[in-house]
Amino acid sequence: MTPAQSKMARAGLGWSLSDLAAASGVSRMTAVRFEGGQSVAPKSVTAIWSAYQAAGVTLIDAGEKSTRGGVGVRLRG
């Protein structure tokens, strides 16, 4: 998961940074640092990704077919 994918997923879900922190169990500051491209602990990235998965998010990685190309996210629903 990239910081850009986190921002896209959060926007698609209508989550604030505080919502992401609550859903993932990381601090709001950790979420801010991650989305800002700063280094965070791998376990924090895993927790963030797990929260998104539980909310129905899947990743579109580089090289996968997508209508616009590039990385992105898909929301279930």
Image (spheres, grey):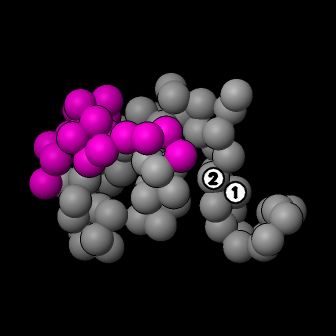
The image position of residue 41, as x and y in percent, is 24, 55
**Considering only vertical position in the picture, is 31 above or below 51?**
below
Q: Based on the picture, tell me whether residue 27 belongs to the magenta stretch.
A: yes
Name which residue type carries label 2: Val
Query: Image quadrant of residue 34?
Result: bottom left
What's drawn in magenta, residue-wise? 12-29
| Residue at horizontal 42 percent and vertical 33 percent from the top | 51
The image position of residue 20, as x and y in percent, is 31, 40
**In this orientation, does residue 40 appear?**
no
How dense is the environment of label 2, judged by Cα within 10 Å: few (below 14), some, or many (20 and up)?
many
Q: Nearer the viewer, residue 16 or 72?
A: 16
| Residue at horizontal 21 percent and vertical 41 percent from the top | 18
The majority secondary structure of the magenta stretch comes to helix
**Considering only vertical position in the picture, is 29 above or below 49?**
below
> Where does label 2 land, which residue?
73
| Residue at horizontal 28 percent and vertical 36 percent from the top | 19
Left or right of 62 in this view: 68: right
The image position of residue 31, as x and y in percent, is 25, 53
**Considering only vertical position in the picture, is 69 above or below 10?**
below
Q: What numbered label is drawn on residue 60?
A: 1
Left or right of 3 in this view: 75: right
Residue at mark 2 to residue at mark 1: CA–CA distance: 5 Å
The image position of residue 68, as x and y in percent, is 79, 71
Query: Image quadrant of residue 3?
Result: bottom left
Q: Do the residues under discs 2 and 1 have CB atoms within 8 angstroms? A: yes
**In this orientation, does residue 31 appear?**
yes
- Say what secondary structure mark 2 lies in: strand
How many callouts does the rendering have? 2
Q: Nearer the viewer, residue 64 or 73?
A: 73
| Residue at horizontal 44 percent and vertical 47 percent from the top | 10
Left or right of 74 in this view: 21: left
